[in-house]
Amino acid sequence: GEDVEQSLFLSVREGDSSVINCTYTDSSSTYLYWYKQEPGAGLQLLTYIFSNMDMKQDQRLTVLLNKKDKHLSLRIADTQTGDSAIYFCAEVRPRGYQKVTFGTGTKLQVIP
Amino acid sequence: NAGVMQNPRHLVRRRGQEARLRCSPVKGHSHVYWYRQLPEEGLKFMVYLQKENIIDESGMPKERFSAEFPKEGPSILRIQQVVRGDSAAYFCASSPAGANEKLFFGSGTQLSVL
């Protein structure tokens, strides 16, 4: 199908790790992004991974990519209350331009 | 170093009125994208424009919606004869050029139709 899928909700305790999963659709996608949306705000690009990589680490964030299964995950180490937000994965489908298709978003709730 | 500017932040319209949403891209960016976020849903692609050209409008409803990105001035998303179902957050994004550039998003316009 055309939809990029994510689970809707995740709740973790402060200090634990969070893992947000995403299944994308197009095996020819060139980039995969993770965006963060705080309440009432726009989208902030957190990190991205090229499709020829299988892992990327950026401070507390680790992105894992399984191209065979078209599965992407975002791990947030030592989750803080400020990490509470909606997280969107997005794939860049090569259509001659930057056609970005977003997932449904995962709402992360961090419990103090 | 201004990012993508959208205005207004909040727009209230009665059914049947027109809504005009404005987006000023990052300085130097020539590509603009509009997305719509319905309550409790993800972002849905609407339209992609370059200066004076619509490149992809496959996500735009066939009626009442139009978009432009003139040579001078901001990009405008126009919704005529709004209905309650148009209530949503409308996000604009811009990129400099090319197929592999990251998108920069504005803070969105929240449209409420009474």
Image: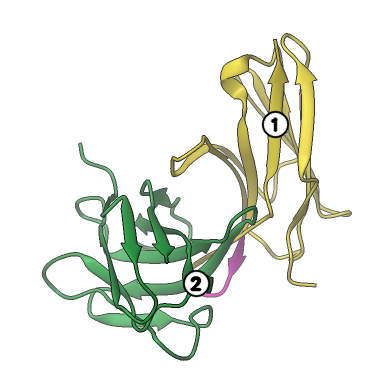
Chain colours: A yellow, B green
The residue at which mark 1 appears reads as A108
Q: Chain of mark 2?
A: B
Q: Residue B85 placed where, x, y %?
A: 53, 72
Magenta: main secondary structure equals: strand
Q: Residue B79 placed where, x, y %?
A: 35, 78
User: Does the CB distance between marks 1 and 2 fall below 8 Å?
Assistant: no
Query: What separation in Å lies between label 1 and label 2 (alpha carbons)?
Result: 29 Å
Callout 1 secondary element: strand
Q: Residue B102 placed where, x, y %?
A: 45, 50
Q: Classify B52 as above or below A47.
A: below
Q: Residue at x 33, y 52 (%)?
A: B10
Q: Residue at x 64, y 52 (%)?
A: B40
Q: Which amino acid is tagged 1?
A: Leu
Residue A95 magenta: yes
The residue at which mark 2 appears reads as B84
Q: Residue A87 placed where, x, y %?
A: 63, 40
Q: Which stretch did the figure color magenta?
A: A92-96
Snapshot quadrant of residue A10: top right
Closest to the observer: B86 or A54? B86
Q: Residue at x 67, y 47 (%)?
A: A105
Closest to the observer: A70 or A38? A38
